[in-house]
Amino acid sequence: MTDCIFCKIIAGEIPAEIVYNGTHVTAFRDINPVAPVHILIIPNQHIDHIRDPRAFEGELLKEMVQTANEIAAMEGIAESGYRLLINYGPDANLVVPHLHLHLIGGKFLGPMVAV
Ligand code: AMP
Ligand code: ZN
């Protein structure tokens, strides 16, 4: 999608600190981190959000979660713990309309609503 900020990151048109670049999935550091580790895992194909039926085709969601787990280990937070989060809709403050999984950790996160 031409005007999508995350598609532009995948295309290399916008800089990002990419930590994983696979065939179906890319991961990069969030520009406004809420914790010492805050990484976004996204499909390389543009998918609007978690209610988009394309999200459920093939093994995509499984691969996104597996990638998040692997990156958590690479970041050294597999034992201390982390949060995986997908926002949808205005109440969850979904801002970027390209499906993304937040990997958040590296400190005690407290109750879920505090993030
Ligand atoms: P959400 O509220 O789930 O839509 O979260 C979107 C996330 O994308 C926020 O945490 C932003 O800080 C992050 N973000 C927006 N633009 C960029 C960018 N250019 N590079 C990295 N992260 C970004
Ligand atoms: Zn996109």
Image (cartoon, helix red, strand yellow):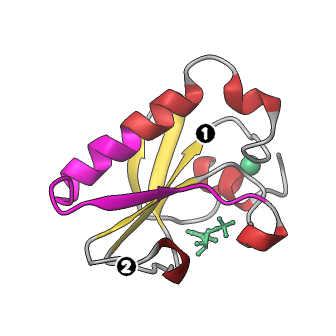
- Does residue 70 belong to the magenta stretch? yes
x then y, percent, for residue 4: 78, 56
Disc 2 element:
loop
Q: Which residue is mark 2?
A: 110
Q: Name the residue: 61% across, 38% down.
A: 44
Q: Name the residue: 20% across, 51% down.
A: 74
Which numbered dot is residue 10? none
Image quadrant where one finds the N terminus: top right
Q: Earlier in the sequence, mark 1 or mark 2?
A: 1
Q: Name the residue: 30% across, 49% down.
A: 71
Q: Which residue is mark 1?
A: 43
In the image, is residue 36 above or below residue 61?
Answer: below
Q: Is residue 10 left or right of residue 46?
A: left
Q: Is residue 16 left or right of residue 71?
A: right
Q: Is residue 60 visible?
A: yes
Examine the image and state in which quarter residue 46 appears.
top right
x then y, percent, for residue 41: 50, 49
Disc 1 within 8 angstroms of ligand 2 (CB): no
Q: Is residue 100 left or right of residue 30?
A: right
x then y, percent, for residue 21: 43, 41
Which contiguous range is marked in magenta? 67-88
User: Looking at this view, is 54 or 46 the one in front?
Assistant: 54
x then y, percent, for residue 68: 39, 46
| Circle 1: residue type | Pro
User: Looking at this view, is 13 or 48 the one in front?
Assistant: 48
